Image: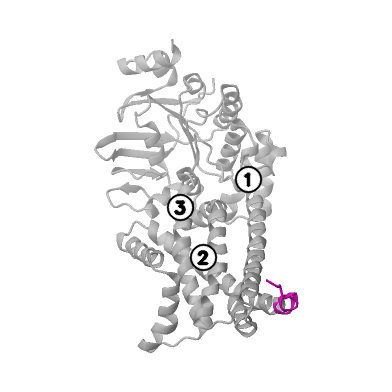
Amino acid sequence: MQIDWQLFGDSLWPIVLGGLSSTIPLSLASFAIGLAIALVMALMRLSRNPVVSFLARAYISVIRGTPLLVQLFVIFYGLPSIGLTLNPWPSAIIAFSLNVGGYAAEVIRAAILSVPKGQWEAGYTIGMSRTTTLRRVILPQAARVSVPPLSNTFISLVKDTSLASLILVTELFRRAQEIAAFSQEFMLIYIEAAMVYWVLCLVLSAGQTRLERRFDRYVAH
Amino acid sequence: MSHTDHGNARPLLRATDLQKSFGEHQVLKSIDLLIGKGQVLALIGPSGSGKTTVLRCLNGLEIPDGGEVAFDGGPAVAFAPGTTQKQAQVLRTRSAMVFQNYNLFPHMTVLENVIEGPVQVQRRKRAEAIAEAESLLARVGLAEKRDAYPHQLSGGQQQRVGIVRALALKPSLLLFDEPTSALDPELVGDVLKVIKELADEDWTMVLVTHELAFAREVADEVVFMDQGVVVERGHPEVVLRNPRNERTKQFVHRLLNPF
């Protein structure tokens, strides 16, 4: 096979641009919103109120028990039939946020539970309420424990955003598909797209390592 | 001897008929305590006797099934099934606790641990809280550790920070839950020395301890508990040297003569 380096070079920027203008913002926005959902779900799941806890359980179960692609299709192609039409971008952000919310909720719940009970009590005895103890004492410690699993979730999300191409979001992979269809160089272009994803994830892994190191300050080795 | 006569002191705390069960097991049967201002009360007894549970009821960490706890000048908190954490929280503003396992906040420096309560809960000025924290740390010989994280300290140092964190709240009552039980033997002395100084300064304290010699030295009253009831109480010289009750005798004898 003859490698068309000219095409490789010419298509690199459009593909990277797809990443910069769509994949990365889509991932960041969905992850941020998803974490907020996850925190709420984790706290609801830990609630002593059985109804509240059940609602969170049900949410997590549905999100984890159905394919992300199906979730995307329900929101983008399904909702219009009940009168709710959303553009590709909002559809994608909603679907990915809800998805991250379901997965990260369990991570955050486990991280909260991993903080010793004595830490709650220490917070209470210096006069803190439950909420203040959670915010000042428990979550900062849970955050450290969550970094590796949440990084996993984030890296999965970055790659999963390629599914948004199927609901007409012009992101990295959609660009690659367009170029491939036009040039008929499927192997070259898709491998190129894969490489761009890979580099993106390498950068994220490096970020994870830095974050872990920052948190390690206060842990015995 | 540091015993002072607190017999006529104004009562600071009164606990009446405290009862607590965990499942089927009744841990506290009916406990009454009266602690005068400036008094040091030592709770002793075998493990499982309920002494730590009593201590935890005094600041609402454990919500009793019945009875009440009242601080001088504050509302009595009466416990019944259904008492909320919020009501129990009322008790906590009056006391501060030192834990067996220190329970320092590992993600905060020594200084941050100490000023957390004053700044975040009591809303005092940060600069003022820092100045006070520094002088308290200097007092227990840890001035130069202010920016260290707890894991960088020895157990004895961590416990002294635990005591400083409690003092920084300016509570009217200090609660100690076996403060030296988790320490290596050679580190116990430093911590006991600090507690002794506090007793001499007329802090009001309730101390759950296995250090009988120490209890004899600092306590104004010793309360011996077994199986959820107070078996004997009185002046340390009496309870620890010439106990009247057979169970107290055995317990004291066993602790003083382990072999």
Does the segment drawn in magenta span residue A7? yes
The chain holding disc 3 is: A
**Mark 1–mark 2 contact, CB under 8 Å?**
no
Residue under circle 2?
A35
Q: Quadrant of residue B199?
A: top right
**B47, B230: nearer the viewer:** B47
As shown in the figure, which amino acid type bears the numbered disc 3?
Ala
Does the segment drawn in magenta span residue A174? no
Work out which quarter of the rendered image holds the C terminus of chain B and state it: top left
Q: What crowding class fits label 1: few (fewer than 14 Cα within 10 Å), some (14-19), or many (20 or more)?
A: some
**B19, A191: nearer the viewer:** A191
How far apart marks 3 and 1 lie (CA) works out to: 20 Å
Between disc 1 and disc 2, the foreground one is 2
Q: Secondary structure at mark 2?
A: helix
Q: Secondary structure at mark 1?
A: loop
Residue under circle 1?
A218
Work out which quarter of the rendered image holds the N terminus of chain B and state it: top right
In-image side of B226 versus B132 (left or right): left
As shown in the figure, which amino acid type bears the numbered disc 1?
Tyr
**Circle number at residue A72:** none
Labels 2 and 3: the sequence-earlier one: 2
Between disc 3 and disc 1, the foreground one is 3
